[in-house]
């Protein structure tokens, strides 16, 4: 274990501040994770007897502004650029400023100054948030170019979903063919799926790139047990791998819980909180690492709020029944697939679908012994009639999704992002720098100050 040292940093104004400098930095970003998301998951976990959340209990807390250069409501690209590079840019841009000039991210500074660098996400690896740390493109939709930036980043580890647009080189300025093949030709060890991940145990290969497949990882609520590794397992591997290769300068690791945002766009609380709880499990892994390596700073932030989520809505008055979300066993996307497969079968009736509804959302069509007479999961006749109409006329999945939000008392105002601030929490050397009212750019500025 290396002891964290103290530096003196001279500021432009001439003031001198001193503070501990971490050897390792682990930055968690919950995409679309603001205070409502963190607190819905918190109350859900407390009710289930598994709370409080590790990320919410960290000793240093800061309210963090999220606006971009072009709007009070940021997108993920501008937010990632601010958090990674310390500069506000236009919505849609990654790693460049509002005029398109290239910026340097804290991950790139870490690399340039001799540190190990890793990027982990639960969504596609060239999605906006991870891209903010290694890519420099005016548009987040330039997926092939962002993938090219990844391959040429010089970073040590990438883990997550696939690379969107790996073959999408049509009309590009530069065409190096399939990007996985190009990466392999440049010396990357690229592995896929559970088998590929397990084969990495104790590897000396470098650099390494694990991908789940071609897409994002499934929602946590839909993830099959023992299938491909999830965020906590990826985080554990990344910490050990980077630590094993690091010298006294340590490493920088960014871990993104990316599908919290996707569930926010879908206005679906059960999927939202399950992915958030999975990110919290990854935070716990980092805190265990920190206990053995106290020279490690752990930071947990969000890039923006998604969905305008609230705890309570008009239909439930002064009540919030987040425990009812525990009845939901799959995302509405997964339900829709199963429902459509069932409905495609000849002779499927509403009664056949009713069983699937009960298994997926916990809604009951009649009281049973377990729930008793006042079981809140028993559907009212009006709702049953409405579900039957949607079975005939379409839109059943969306009706069920809304019914679930209303039953739990979760309100949503938008299918997009909002301008709410996010919460940044932290522990470890340097964490005292992340308190009070912050701007999202302060995160990158502070991390960079540890390195230079
Ligand atoms: Zn985002």
Image (cartoon, rainbow, N blue to C red):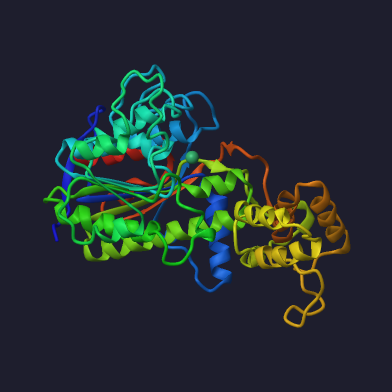
Left/right placement of residue 86 relative to residue 373 reads: left
Q: Quadrant of the N terminus?
A: bottom left
Left/right placement of residue 335 relative to residue 192 reads: right
Q: Quadrant of residue 57?
A: bottom left
Residue 332 in picture, x, y percent from top left? 64, 53
Please tell me which residue lies in front, 317 or 379.
Answer: 379
Q: Which residue is drawn at the image coordinates 39% and 56% (left, top)?
A: 231
**In the image, farthest residue toward the left:** 247
Quick check: 208 above or below 14?
A: below
Residue 434 in picture, x, y percent from top left? 36, 46
Q: Quadrant of residue 308?
A: top right
Left/right placement of residue 119 relative to residue 366 reads: left
Left/right placement of residue 78 relative to residue 345 reads: left
Q: How many marks?
A: 0
Q: Quadrant of residue 169?
A: top left
Q: Is residue 191 visible?
A: yes
Residue 56 in picture, x, y percent from top left? 46, 58
Q: Which residue is drawn at the image coordinates 28% and 58% (left, top)?
A: 237
Quick check: 151 above or below 200?
A: above
């Amino acid at each position: 274990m290396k002891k964290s040292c103290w530096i003196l940093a001279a500021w432009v104004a001439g003031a001198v501040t001193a503070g501990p400098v971490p050897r390792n930095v682990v930055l968690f970003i919950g995409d679309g994770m603001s205070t409502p998301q963190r607190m819905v998951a918190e109350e859900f976990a407390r009710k289930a007897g598994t709370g409080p959340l590790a990320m919410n209990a960290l000793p240093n807390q800061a309210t963090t502004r999220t606006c971009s250069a072009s709007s009070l409501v940021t997108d993920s690209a501008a937010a990632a650029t601010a958090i990674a590079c310390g500069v506000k840019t236009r919505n849609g841009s990654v790693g460049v400023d509002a005029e398109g000039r290239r910026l340097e991210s804290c991950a790139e500074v870490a690399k340039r100054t001799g540190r190990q660098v890793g990027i982990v996400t639960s969504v596609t690896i060239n999605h906006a948030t991870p891209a903010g740390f290694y890519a420099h493109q005016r548009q987040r939709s330039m997926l092939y170019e962002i993938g090219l930036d990844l391959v040429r980043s010089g970073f040590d580890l990438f883990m997550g979903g696939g690379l969107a647009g790996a073959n999408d080189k049509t009309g590009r300025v530069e065409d190096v063919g399939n990007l996985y093949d190009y990466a392999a030709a440049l010396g990357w060890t690229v592995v896929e799926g559970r088998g590929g991940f397990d084969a990495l145990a104790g590897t000396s290969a470098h650099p390494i790139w694990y991908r789940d497949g071609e897409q994002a990882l499934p929602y946590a609520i839909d993830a099959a047990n023992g299938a491909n590794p999830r965020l906590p397992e990826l985080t554990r591997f990344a910490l050990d791998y980077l630590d094993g290769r690091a010298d006294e300068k340590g490493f920088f690791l960014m871990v993104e819980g990316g599908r919290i945002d996707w569930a926010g766009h879908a206005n679906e609380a059960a999927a939202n909180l399950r992915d958030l709880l999975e990110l919290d499990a990854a935070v716990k892994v980092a805190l265990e690492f920190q206990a053995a390596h106290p020279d490690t700073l752990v930071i947990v932030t969000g890039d923006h709020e998604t969905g305008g989520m609230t705890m309570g809505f008009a239909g439930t008055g002064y009540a919030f029944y987040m425990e009812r979300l525990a009845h939901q066993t799959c995302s509405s996307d997964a339900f829709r697939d199963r429902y459509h497969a069932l409905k495609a079968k000849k002779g499927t009736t509403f009664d056949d679908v009713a069983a699937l509804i009960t298994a997926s959302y916990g809604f009951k069509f009649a009281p049973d012994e377990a729930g008793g007479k006042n079981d809140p999961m028993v559907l009212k006749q009006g709702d049953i009639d409405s579900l039957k109409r949607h079975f005939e006329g379409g839109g059943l999945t969306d009706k069920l999704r809304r019914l679930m939000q209303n039953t739990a008392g979760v309100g949503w105002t938008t299918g997009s992002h909002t301008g709410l601030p996010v919460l940044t929490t932290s522990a470890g050397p340097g964490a005292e720098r992340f308190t009070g009212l912050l701007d999202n750019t302060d995160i990158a500025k502070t991390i960079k100050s540890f390195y230079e």
